[in-house]
Image (tube, helix red, strand yellow):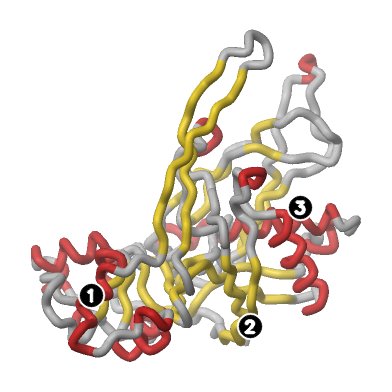
Amino acid sequence: MPQLTMCHLTFPHGIHIGAGGVESVEDSLEYVPSDTLFAALLDTWRHLGREVKELLPENGEPALRVTSAFPFAGGVRFYPKPVDLRELFTEETLKTESAGKRLKKIRYISEQLLLKAANGQYLDNFLFPEDENEDPKTGIALQGGTFWLLPEEVKDLPKEWQLSAEKWWLLRRKKVYETQTAPRVTVDRVNSASNLFQSERVLFNAGCGLWFGVARNSISQAEFENLLTILGDSGLGGERTAGYGHFTFEQKGEFSLNAPQSSAYLLSRWHPKADEVSLLPHSAYKLEAVEGWLRTPENAAAQRRKRVWLVAEASLIAGNPQGDAVDVKPEYDAKSGETILHPVYRPGFAVTLDWKPKH
């Protein structure tokens, strides 16, 4: 039974994780995809003078697997809403207009709700009320309905949020994170022309941040802690020179994962191996196009990585996906003289939760 070590990250100055591909730095995700996190750990590992093949052997299991980093509030961890709502709610609820409005708002559900659904239970009876001024009895909303948790989890929220039951309706106004935009300017190197644009960052409120789980295979606890400490000092994501992305971390126990029996909920992005593509026709999934810029020890100019498609978190896969890493090194015409002499890996190793399908 794989064990995840749960790591909680606190970002004092916020974070910018580009959401618009190579052409846009204006929008930011509120979470860190697993391929971004793993690639950052791999880059930090290389800067420590270690070999990439120590973490990514050409054949065999990687030295570690990581989930994506999702929001937490106090001691409550949140997970992305599964892509197939029929696995959460009955047809009757899904056809109800009032419920539909709430379901569209929900992006994250609490760990306890996720485990109930994963074990075959419908969540209809735990949905928070439509009227935001109504006292919630069975389900609680945060941030206008973006986050959903159970009443018994309120005691684990940040201390300032732990209200008495008759005031739980006020929790819908509490925000786990907020977004801010700041003006930025680029100056053309040829004619000195300036170009003004906006850059977004995500700021987490007190007691909130991002969590991720790591399953260590051939890397020691001490090595991993050192790796994560250095990454926290150098920063994660974009706009690091402006202070974004720097974090401290705290380990918050272990989480056991049972091997999927018939279906799996993805806690990470996944790049199917050739013999795993056959799992997709029987699965409920979403695809993400992943592209961006690469950094190389050859000190070459910034270059674009090849685009790769990954299966998104919260997809429900019919089987036990494993995944692999894909080389996204750019390819150039031989006449151009451009080349990158080493692979540029984008990890797509799956981390999964066993899911009991309802249909």
Badge 3 density bin: few <14, some 14–19, many ≥20, Cα 10 Å: some
Residue with the mark numbered 1? 170
Marking on residue 280: none
Secondary structure under the numbered disc 3 in the rendered image? helix
CB under 8 Å between discs 2 and 3: no
The CA span between labels 1 and 3 is: 43 Å
Residue 47 sits above or below residue 19 on the image: below
Mark 1 or mark 2: whose residue is earlier in sequence: 2
Mark 2 or mark 3: whose residue is earlier in sequence: 2
Residue type marked 2 = Pro
Residue with the mark numbered 2? 2
The CA span between labels 2 and 3 is: 25 Å
Marking on residue 43: 3
CB under 8 Å between discs 1 and 3: no
Q: Which label lies toward us, 1 or 3?
A: 1
Q: Position of residue 37 (x, y in %)?
A: 63, 58
Residue type marked 1 = Leu
Residue placed most toward the observer, 132 or 102: 132
Asked if one can make out residue 36 in the rendered structure from this viewpoint, the answer is no
Residue 344 sits above or below residue 183 on the image: below
Residue at 69% from the left image edge and 31% from the top image edge: 303
Q: Hey, which quadrant is residue 181 in on the image?
A: top left
Q: Is 211 on the left-hand or right-hand side of 334?
A: left
Secondary structure under the numbered disc 1 in the rendered image? helix
Q: Which label lies toward us, 1 or 2?
A: 1
Q: Position of residue 265 (x, y in %)?
A: 45, 71
Mark 1 or mark 3: whose residue is earlier in sequence: 3
Badge 2 density bin: few <14, some 14–19, many ≥20, Cα 10 Å: some
Q: Hey, which quadrant is residue 168 in on the image?
A: bottom left
Q: Which label lies toward us, 2 or 3?
A: 3
